Image (cartoon, rainbow, N blue to C red):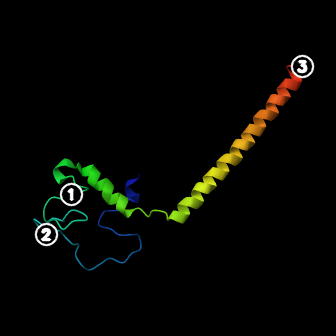
């Protein structure tokens, strides 16, 4: 990327009005409690102490809580769509296979 196209980290969006308030700096020694907890002791996930849980495992659980899962009816409808499309495609490909098989038998093998 060309240097003149890069935006400086302090700059906002192009054309935005500059803010008069200073940037917020974190306080020295301030820490955030772990996501989903109060920060008062080791977190437990389904009976495992925090010592036995790798960091990526906790992060995966945090991300899975953010997922918007489909409702039961949406899941049923989408499953039916997949089954119908799979059957239709299978019948179509089976029909093409039978057609090509018949053509080969009539032309090459007679």
User: What residue did someone put label 3 on?
Assistant: 110
Q: In the rendered image, which residue does mark 1 sit on?
A: 44
Q: Badge 3, how many Cα within 10 Å: few under 14, some, many 20+?
A: few
Residue 89 locus on image (x, y percent): 69, 45
Q: Is residue 71 left or right of residue 59?
A: right
Q: Which residue is mark 2?
A: 27
Residue at 23% x, 48% y is 54
Of residues 32 and 5, the one nearer the viewer is 32
In screen coordinates, is 64 left or right of 28?
Answer: right
Q: What label does residue 34 carry, if any?
A: none
Q: Which residue occupies 21% across, 62% down?
A: 34
User: Which numbered disc, 3 or 2, marks the residue that appears first in the sequence?
Assistant: 2
User: How far separated are the C-alphas under marks 3 and 2?
Assistant: 88 Å
Mark 1 or mark 3: name the one nearer the start of the chain: 1
> Which quadrant, please, contains the C terminus?
top right
Q: How far apart are labels 1 and 3 at the CA level?
A: 74 Å
Q: Residue furthest left?
A: 29
């Amino acid at each position: 990327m060309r240097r003149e196209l890069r935006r400086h980290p302090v700059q906002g969006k192009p054309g935005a009005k500059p803010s008069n308030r200073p940037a917020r700096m974190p306080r020295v020694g301030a820490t955030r409690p772990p996501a989903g907890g109060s920060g008062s002791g080791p977190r437990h996930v389904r009976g495992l102490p925090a010592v036995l849980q790798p960091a990526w495992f906790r992060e995966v659980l945090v991300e899975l809580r953010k997922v918007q899962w489909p409702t039961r009816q949406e899941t049923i409808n989408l499953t039916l769509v997949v089954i119908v499309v799979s059957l239709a495609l299978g019948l179509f490909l089976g029909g093409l296979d039978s057609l090509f098989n018949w053509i080969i038998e009539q032309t090459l093998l007679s």
